[in-house]
Amino acid sequence: MKADHPMAAASLTLQFLLELSALAALAYWGFKTGDRAFARIGLAVAAPLAAALAWAIFGSPKAPIHLEGSMRLLLEFTFFGSAAIGLAAAGQAVPAIAFALVVVGNIALLHALGQA
């Protein structure tokens, strides 16, 4: 499919929303994981912050070190996979599976559209 396919804008918008959802999922995991208030807040801030930093450096469209090919897939697997695993570990298995399926489908669509 062509890169200017009408679905490309929708898929890129969904990608951005999935990125934000991944950060929210990591914050949720952090808050549910800590055993004390300080640990809960610390993990709820640190986990998405670390993921956002990695995404900003390697994954965003204007990243200083923009990964492509198999390295990009590894980054996406790690970034989105950690969010899905975090949701599952926090007792949210159904949302974790749904999130993972939407991520995989959207990444496949982005690749088919030449946007990845």
Image: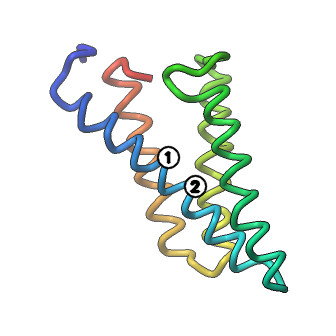
Q: Position of residue 83 (x, y in %)?
A: 62, 57
Q: Secondary structure at mark 2?
A: helix
Q: Nearer the viewer, residue 14 or 96?
A: 14
The colour style of the image is rainbow
Is 8 placed above or below 78 here?
above
User: Residue 61 vs residue 52: left or right?
Assistant: left
Residue lying at the far bottom in this picture: please name it. Answer: 36
Q: Residue at x 49, y 46 (%)?
A: 19
Q: Quadrant of the N terminus?
A: top left
| Spatial separation of the CA atoms under disc 1 and disc 2 | 7 Å
Q: Position of residue 4 (x, y in %)?
A: 21, 16
* Mark number, residue 76: none
Is 42 placed above or below 81 here?
below
Q: Quadrant of the C terminus?
A: top left
User: Residue 78 vs residue 95: left or right?
Assistant: right
Amino acid on which disc 2 is placed: Leu
* Mark number, residue 23: 2
